Image (cartoon, rainbow, N blue to C red):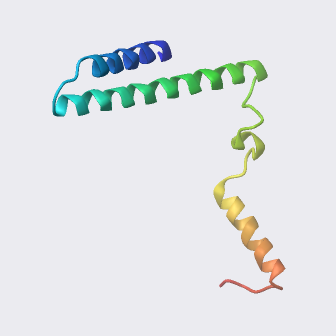
Amino acid sequence: MAVLAALAALTALVVLLSWHPAGILTVALALLVVLLGTVTGTAVAALRDRDARSEHGAAPTNQPDALLGGIDADTLDALDSEAVRSRLGGVSDR
């Protein structure tokens, strides 16, 4: 997928640079190049992530979800509120 999107982006860029269409066609080709470049980048990132997961058998250690296994945003908020109240000397927010 990444190779196909990269080739399509390169082809659209060559067409845009060699054949100078006027008006809205130029904008459409430029947007197509940006869109295909984004698809290429996303596909490459997905391939890297898949390779890293297959090497380690799980999520890479530099991923935030691997570091905080089982803790959700509500738990972090509750822990933080308790820490702030304890630092302020027991001030309640209720």
Residue 74 vertical placement versus 35 (above, below): below
**Residue found 67% across the figure and 53% down from its top:** 72
Farthest residue, direction left: 23
Residue 61 vertical placement versus 73 (above, below): above
**28 left or right of 63 in image:** left
**28 left or right of 58 in image:** left
How far from the left and from the top, in percent, is residue 34? 38, 31
- Between residues 30 and 57, which one lies in front from this camera angle? 30
**Residue found 35% across the figure and 21% down from its top:** 13
How far from the left and from the top, in percent, is residue 36? 39, 25
- Between residues 61 and 30, which one lies in front from this camera angle? 30
**Residue found 74% across the figure and 27% down from its top:** 58
Q: Quadrant of residue 93?
A: bottom right
Q: Quadrant of the C terminus?
A: bottom right
How far from the left and from the top, in percent, is residue 6? 45, 17
Residue 25 vertical placement versus 10 (above, below): below
- Between residues 53 and 17, which one lies in front from this camera angle? 17
How far from the left and from the top, in percent, is residue 41? 51, 27
**34 left or right of 59 in image:** left
- Between residues 15 and 86, which one lies in front from this camera angle? 15
- Give the number of marks: 0
**Residue found 31% across the figure and 21% down from its top:** 17
Q: Quadrant of residue 77?
A: bottom right
